[in-house]
Amino acid sequence: MTKITEIRLVLGDQLNAKHSWWREKQDHVLYVMMEMRQETDYVKHHIQKITAFFLAMRNFAQALEHAGHRVHYIRLDDADNTQSLTNNLENLLQQHTKANLSCMLPDEYRVDHQLRSWAGKLDLDINWVDSEHFLTPRAILSEWFPGKDNFLMESFYRRVRKQFNIMMEGDKPEGGQWNYDHQNRNKLPKNETVVAPYCPENDVTEIHQMLQDQDVQSFGEIDPKQFIWPTTRQQARDILAFFCQHQLAHFGTYQDAMTDTEVHDHAWSLYHSRLSFAMNSKMLHPMEVVNAVIAHWRENQDSITINQVEGFVRQIIGWREFIRAIYWHHMPAYKNLNALNHQRDLPQFFWNGETQMRCLSQAIKQSLKYAYAHHIQRLMLTGNFALLAGCDPDQVDAWYLGIYIDALEWVELPNTRGMSQFADNGVLATKPYISSANYIKKMSNHCAQCRYSPDKKTGTNACPFNSLYWQFLSRHESHFSNNQRMAMMYSLWNKKPQEEQRALLDQAEHYLNNMDEL
């Protein structure tokens, strides 16, 4: 057999079947993939998240072998698995003494730092290659906006659209507008029939048993006989095709809507594509997704309006790329930011959904059941509450990073610590994303099923979001009073009689002191 002269590392989120590495079969190249306790244990993960990555990795390794590539796959329970990325690599390099090491650039800082630190200690040269997935490089913000430290997603998004000629007519956006957000804030009508989502059926019994045997700590629910997340490229493509055919026509209109399981079937999925895991593991390329959606729209413009498509495209080429750029521009310091000095423990109900606040109970129980919630549930329900309550952003980060199947640090951290918790002091958002019960009532039908009244600010059964909202504004007035986007709310607060202010603050304090009973 040909001697191995190159070892190529493929991480669990680098399952890019279109990568240039696979273009030719090379017998001297050994591809290495690993299941490791290092990855199952750096945070407590949802059982479905660990399972999805491991099965997708196994399927990918099998596909590489079928294509004629040499693959060394280390399973979690293999006797010679050190459970450490660099220790496993060191063992392989000792076995193949003539081999060089090549790695795709990791997307998580901790893995990048681990590899570079290890290589530095060993005086080892790693041949770094791009993962060939993202549209923009890590350092794109410095390249496009030199000398700046504050960036606007909208400016970034427009530049990406122009550069890649996505929905453009010359220098102008197709349809005459860059952004149709104002059309995408509709509540789901009560009589709306939501289409059942397309879900693959995977048997993950073997992996589930292995995780139990190895005593891997996790949380959340799983049906090992009927695992619904895509773990092959074909399954991911099938979900994309289903989204185009059955969900795209309503995606934009209802992308911010939330609904109760008592009111609508398929409340967890609505019209969302649920492609984030397939994309973040790199089974699907962002341009492949964008092109499929745009092509389907062009063939069906009589039934699909431009706002549905633009809203979806913006999430992928605008928001997703921008979030990654923010991450690499500000790491590693970003991970420790806590601008509002929030220290409170996350309530216990975040781990079990046992709260009488209907919106939070629904969002959290859904997350525990599916390892998924859409962006408004994450931002304006769980994130909003954690911010209003002053929860420690380290704990909030760990929860989001663990519970969601699509959560990798490069995408989770800026979305949580920045967008959701304002711990970055406005690097990502110009103001905190907070609301009282009014927004939740407007965008969902949870309030009708709830013990608490969204219309009451104080007293028995007053919705906690109301008093916590005003208490947040009060306790951070010195921080935000000069923020023009919050001037109206501070004006309203300061016009309230002192007795009303005191009642709101007392109500909030009572709730904060009894969060696990809410």
Image (cartoon, helix red, strand yellow):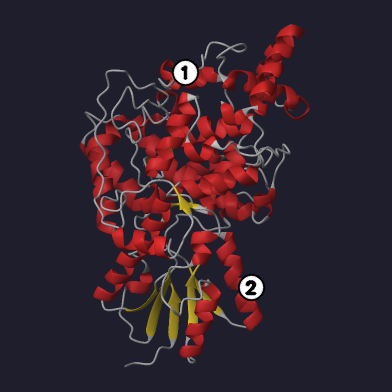
User: What's under tag 1, amino acid-wise?
Assistant: Lys
Which of these two is toward me, 495 or 342?
342
| Depicted 125 relative to depicted 335: above or below | below
Residue appearing at x 30%, y 42% in the figure: 294
- The residue indicated by pointer 1 is 441
Q: How far, Cα to Cα, is label 2 from label 1?
A: 50 Å
Q: Position of residue 68 (x, y in %)?
A: 26, 78
Asked whether 43 or 153 is in front, the reply is: 43
Residue 283 visible to the viewer:
yes
Nearer to us: label 2 or label 1: 1
Residue 117 circle label: 2
Query: Residue shown at 69%/39% (left/top)?
Result: 425
- Quarter-of-image position of residue 213: bottom left
| Residue 474 location (% of width, % of height) | 73, 22
Does the rendering let one see residue 169?
A: no
The answer to whether the residue labelled 2 contacts the one labelled 1, judged by CB atoms less than 8 Å apart, is no
